[in-house]
Image (tube, rainbow, N blue to C red):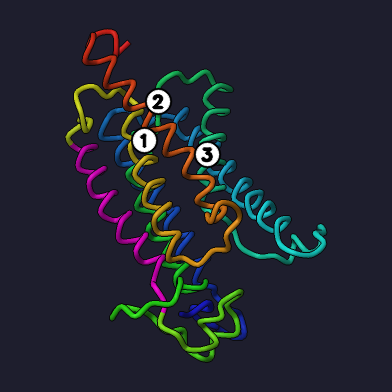
């Protein structure tokens, strides 16, 4: 792994920051293309995107604060400031909150998730490459694609016993990047065709489909990520995504049942 991508005249360029910024740029560029193709590019949409970005930035750090407070020892403001990093799930929640609040503020009624989600999926996948380079890869494995952390970087990765022992570990972030790349390809394909995955779905359900797929995958990949257990044998991330997965499954089951009874009523 390589937390510092390159150093120029004593100035370090961090891998995580580079790929996160690249992912944000790709997500914004993709949203612009999709919105223009669908005739929905407007100043209002730009404000909505800006609200989502602010919410993501704030909640990514807030989610990390919760993780810091749960660590052993006494929490402090100074300790939080020194506890670097961000959390993706907090960022996603913050983006959703920021979008909802901005839409209410400017009086925008239509769903925007279907426009944003193909680029968001691809952007997260790109950002996860930065996580792979900068963080603990995963749990030890005997699989042939297990990765080893170079000795010169092993001491820089927090809470990584396998890094110090030279063990092969799951490239869990790359699993996520590969999954998101395939998911974004499918979402872009649907977006170009301006279709939804099923006839009983409505505007906004493409975004909900992404959330359902990502929540399910994230729950599974956590088993090889090596994050500490918090309750019931699950990590904090699993405890967050499992209720979301259940709620989304219930939503789609109800939507499908309404459509089977009355397609017109389900679309209302």
Q: Secondary structure at mark 2?
A: loop
Q: Secondary structure at mark 3?
A: helix
- Residue numbers of the magenta segment: 169-192
Give me the residue at 53% from left, 28% from top.
100
Image coordinates for residue 108, horizontal then vertical, percent? 47, 20
Q: Check if residue 102 falls in the magenta segment.
A: no
In the image, residue 263 above or below residue 245: above
Depth check, front residue: 261 or 204: 261
Q: Secondary structure at mark 1?
A: helix
In the image, residue 198 above or below residue 81: above
Give me the residue at 36% from left, 35% from top.
207
Identify the residue position indicated by label 3 in the image.
52
Q: CA distance from mark 2 to mark 3?
A: 13 Å
Disc number for residue 216: none
Mark 2 or mark 3: name the one nearer the start of the chain.
3
Q: CA distance from mark 1 to mark 2?
A: 9 Å
Identify the residue position indicated by label 1 in the image.
207
In the image, residue 193 above or below residue 256: below
In the image as oriented, which residue stretches furthest toward the front?
232
Are the residues tagged 1 and 2 within 8 Å (C-beta)?
A: yes
Q: Give the main secondary structure, helix, strand or loop, of the magenta stretch.
A: helix
Q: Is residue 1 left or right of residue 57?
A: left
Depth check, front residue: 33 or 124: 124
Are the residues tagged 3 and 1 within 8 Å (C-beta)?
A: no
In the image as oriented, which residue stretches furthest toward the left?
193
Image coordinates for residue 176, horizontal then vertical, percent? 37, 59
Quadrant for the C terminus, please: top left
Identify the residue position indicated by label 2 in the image.
111
């Amino acid at each position: 792994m390589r937390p510092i991508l390159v150093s120029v005249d004593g100035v370090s360029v961090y891998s995580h920051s580079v790929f996160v910024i690249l992912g944000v740029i790709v997500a914004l560029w993709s949203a612009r293309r999709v919105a223009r193709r669908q005739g929905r590019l407007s100043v209002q949409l730009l404000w909505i995107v800006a609200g989502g970005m602010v919410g993501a930035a704030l909640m990514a750090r807030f989610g990390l604060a919760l993780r810091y407070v749960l660590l052993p020892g006494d929490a402090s403001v100074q300790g939080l400031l020194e506890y670097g990093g961000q959390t993706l799930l907090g960022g996603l929640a913050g983006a959703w909150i920021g979008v909802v609040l901005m839409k209410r503020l400017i009086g925008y009624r239509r769903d925007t998730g279907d426009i944003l989600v193909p680029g968001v999926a691809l952007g997260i996948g790109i950002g996860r490459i930065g996580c792979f380079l900068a963080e603990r890869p995963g749990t030890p494995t005997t699989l042939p694609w297990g990765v080893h952390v170079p000795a010169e970087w092993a001491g820089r990765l927090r809470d990584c016993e396998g890094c110090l022992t030279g063990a092969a570990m799951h490239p869990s972030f790359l699993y996520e990047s590969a999954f998101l790349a395939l998911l974004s390809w499918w979402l872009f394909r649907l977006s170009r065709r301006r279709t939804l995955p099923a006839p009983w779905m409505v505007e906004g359900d493409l975004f909900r489909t992404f959330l359902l797929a990502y929540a399910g995958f994230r729950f599974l990949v956590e088993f090889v990520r090596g994050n500490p257990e918090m309750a019931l044998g699950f990590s904090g991330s699993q405890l967050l995504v499992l209720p979301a997965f259940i709620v989304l499954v219930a939503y789609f089951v109800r939507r499908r049942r309404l459509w089977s009874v009355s397609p017109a009523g389900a679309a209302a």
